[in-house]
Image (spheres, rainbow, N blue to C red):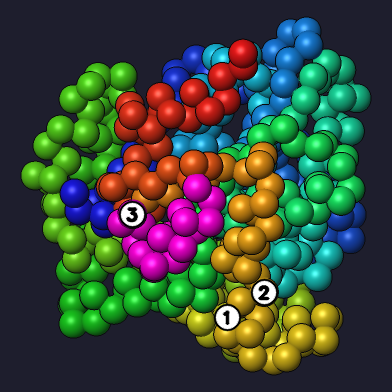
Amino acid sequence: ANPYMATLTYEIVQTEKNSPARQVVIPGLASRAKVPLLEGRNSTKVNVYRQKGLAPMAFMLTGTGSQSTDAGVNSQAEQLYKLGYSVVVFPSPMSWNFILAENQSAIPGYTPDEARLLYDYMQKVMGIINADHSLQISDYVLTGYSLGAGAAAFISEIDRTEKVYNFTKILLVNPPLDLLYSISTLDQLLYVAAQWTPATIDYVKSLIYSYGADLLARNYQDPSYYIGFEKTPFGNTSYDMFLIGAAFRSTLGDDIFTIEQINDTGLLKVPAVKGRQSDREDEAHAISFAEYAQKVVVPRLAEAHGLTPNISAIFNTASTKGLKAKLAANPKVFIFHNADDILVKPQDIQAFEAAMGGRMTVFPRGGHLGNVWYSDNIKMFKELFRRN
């Protein structure tokens, strides 16, 4: 029932031990091969589940900063594979290596731009995969999770016009309906530690390696896997809030470090020195989402797109709620959301539910993505994509 504890369970979702997935390396921008401190890392990887013979293809988009190996999304990919789908799981455009390898501007954070990048990247990836493994594809479906769901919403509009894939079904799982509200909430989660001592912060961070490791060592197929979770230190809501906020902030810090190594916008003051880069990384991890948005994203968009340099106005154009009428009018789009999602305002969920009608399912619990492992959710997910 605790939405923060539920959210945290997403981090201990596991995939099957003998996964059929294979990683494929996607070469990136050649000009990024010699970025200082990131030399030779200008590539990305996708996870590919390949069926033999003719099969539908599912594209799956991960959440903020996630790699294509994200366990939560891949656990869902395994369900689709069992239903007869070939699957490609893509990394997030907000992951540091995607920024380095694929983002020409190297300043992410605006969902319409990320959707365009991902749509082009999908075509690049499929060209590489088909060159090595000629796939027989009957049709395409698309799913997105968290920020990946927001990108999928914008991709649905791109594909309606360009029809490269003509997706037959699109599922958005826990999209951030109001992006500015979501990032503000993520920043606020860390405030819970404002009065904590350094020792307390170190202790809470260590829980990932102590109690977290114990959870991962359990048999994930055991129905009692999550029983007793609330009796561990993760039952402390303040700890959960901090760990969630710290995880997102860590991802953002990695992004900012990469961005500044490419662009050097002046956001970071500590110089980049080989062998002493940890100080610059620490500075990057101290920057909030709001500060990054205001100092980097907004000025870049004002210059590149001629948008008014107002953070609220810009993020309104980047939020899923701005597409509500178009998504409601597209019979191919479905939404799974949670009534207690910690990153979404309840009134926004209610407004979408009214607009989407029977194509939106709102679960009473789960926090943010914290019920993808739950049996009822898995059943509904499979029912949505089961072939007749």
Category of crowding for the residue at label 1, using alpha-carbon neighbours closer than 10 angstroms: few (below 14), some (14–19), many (at least 20)? some
Q: Position of residue 79 (x, y in %)?
A: 51, 22
Element type at mark 2: helix
Q: Is residue 276 visible to the viewer in this orientation of the structure?
A: no
* In front of the other: 356 or 322: 356
Category of crowding for the residue at label 3, using alpha-carbon neighbours closer than 10 angstroms: few (below 14), some (14–19), many (at least 20)? many
* In front of the other: 28 or 238: 238
Is 79 rendered above or below residue 232? Answer: above
- Say which of marks 3 and 1 sits in front: 3
The quarter of the image holding the C terminus is top right
Toward the top, the furthest residue is 53
Q: Is residue 241 left or right of residue 117?
A: left
Q: Position of residue 31 (x, y in %)?
A: 89, 61
Name the residue tied to disc 2: 317
Q: Which residues are magenta?
A: 339-357
Name the residue tied to disc 1: 292
Q: Can residue 347 be found in the magenta stretch?
A: yes
Q: Position of residue 370 (x, y in %)?
A: 34, 45
| Residue drawn at x 87%, y 42% as measured from the top left | 163
User: Residue 313 occupies which quadrant of the picture?
Assistant: bottom right
Toward the bottom, the furthest residue is 309
Q: Is residue 211 visible to the viewer in this orientation of the structure?
A: yes
User: Residue 82 occupies which quadrant of the picture?
Assistant: top right
Q: Which mark is residue 339?
A: 3
